[in-house]
Image: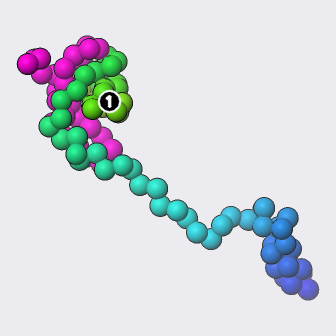
Amino acid sequence: MFFTTLALFLKSPFGSLLTLDDSIEQKGTKDRSALLHTEGEAVTDLRPGGRAVFDGHRVDVTAQTGYVACGSHIRVIKVQGNQITVKEIQPT
């Protein structure tokens, strides 16, 4: 009797608010491999982590050397999953 009542309760509108959905949506990270060898600009100090702009898109990056000043020209040297590694370059 208890299990029957519980099953009916969980299928009711109120009971469905208390339970999790059966499906789990996969939300993976964006594929950032297209940024490899792209040049951009550091918009924050990279010590070693910070933010940079590539083709108008702001992304989180990590400096290879440890510190890169804000406004420096940088190039993506490695993309592994959602971790983007950059190095400072001389402006051309």
Percent position (x, y) of residue 19?
73, 65
Q: Secondary structure at mark 1?
A: loop
Percent position (x, y) of residue 3?
84, 82
Q: Which residues are magenta?
A: 66-92
Where residue 86 sits, quadrant-wise, is: top left
What residue does disc 1 label?
56
Percent position (x, y) of residue 79?
23, 43
Tell me if residue 17 comes above or below residue 42 in the rendering. below
Tell me if residue 15 comes above or below residue 92 in the rendering. below
Horizontally, residue 54 falls left or right of residue 13, namely left
Horizontally, residue 84 falls left or right of residue 16, namely left
Residue occupying the point 30% across, 40% down: 83
Residue occupying the point 33% across, 19% down: 43
Tell me if residue 60 comes above or below residue 9 in the rendering. above
Q: How many marks?
A: 1
The answer to which of 39 and 11 lies nearer the viewer is 39
Where residue 89 sits, quadrant-wise, is: top left
Question: What is the three-letter code of the residue carrying label 1?
Answer: Gly
